[in-house]
Amino acid sequence: MATALHPAPPALWQRDGGWDGFTWLSVDDNTADTVAFLCTDGRGRSLAVVCNFSPVHRKGYRLGVPFRGRWEPLLNTDDDAFGGSGLGDRQPLGTEDIPCHGQQQSLTIDLPPMAAMVWRCTRRYPPRKKKSDLAAQCGSIS
């Protein structure tokens, strides 16, 4: 994981000329001292960046993301390869249908203290149909 950002993924630089490649996920979580944002390249591939500016280990931190999928940690500045304590997720995680940070999906992550983590969406799933949509389909005749 230590060299996962070399060379830099296009989501970090490809759309730097405007706001269309950048989305704030959480800019006002002052109780947890965290910020999070999403970078997206020209092909729609996304990276979520979350930073913990506090000395508190945030195990179980919920991070809102804009779509269902599988996300893998690409960089963890608390990794022991960088002299950190080695806290934080190492395995991919799937989203949950729990809204957070104004997004319909979220991840529950292990966010180390005084660290930043970068998550890459490796598999994007189609949105789930709402129960009201399913009920409208039941008994309909084409």
Image: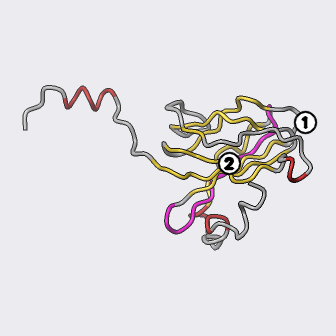
Q: Which residue is mark 1?
A: 55
Mark 1 or 2 closer to N-term? Answer: 1
- Residue 68 in percent (x, y) is at 48, 42
Q: Which residue is mark 2?
A: 73
- Residue 85 in percent (x, y) is at 89, 41
Between 81 and 96, the one nearer to me in the picture: 81
What is the span of residues highlighted in magenta in the rendered image?
Answer: 31-44
Calculate the distance from the C-alpha at mark 1 to the C-alpha at mark 2.
21 Å
Quadrant of the image occupied by residue 130: top left
Residue 121 shown in magenta? no
- Residue 23 in percent (x, y) is at 61, 54
Q: How is the image coloured?
A: secondary structure
Image quadrant occupied by the C terminus: top left
Using the image, determine if residue 43 lies above or below residue 140.
below
Residue type at numbered disc 1: Pro
Callout 1 secondary element: loop
Measuring 58% from the left and 46% from the top, which residue is drawn there?
71
Residue 42 shown in magenta? yes
- Residue 32 in percent (x, y) is at 79, 33
Density class for disc 1 (Cα within 10 Å; few <14, some 14-19, many ≥20) is few
Using the image, determine if residue 49 lies above or below residue 52.
below
Using residue 46 as the reference point, say whether residue 133 is left or right of it. Answer: left
Between 53 and 94, the one nearer to me in the picture: 94
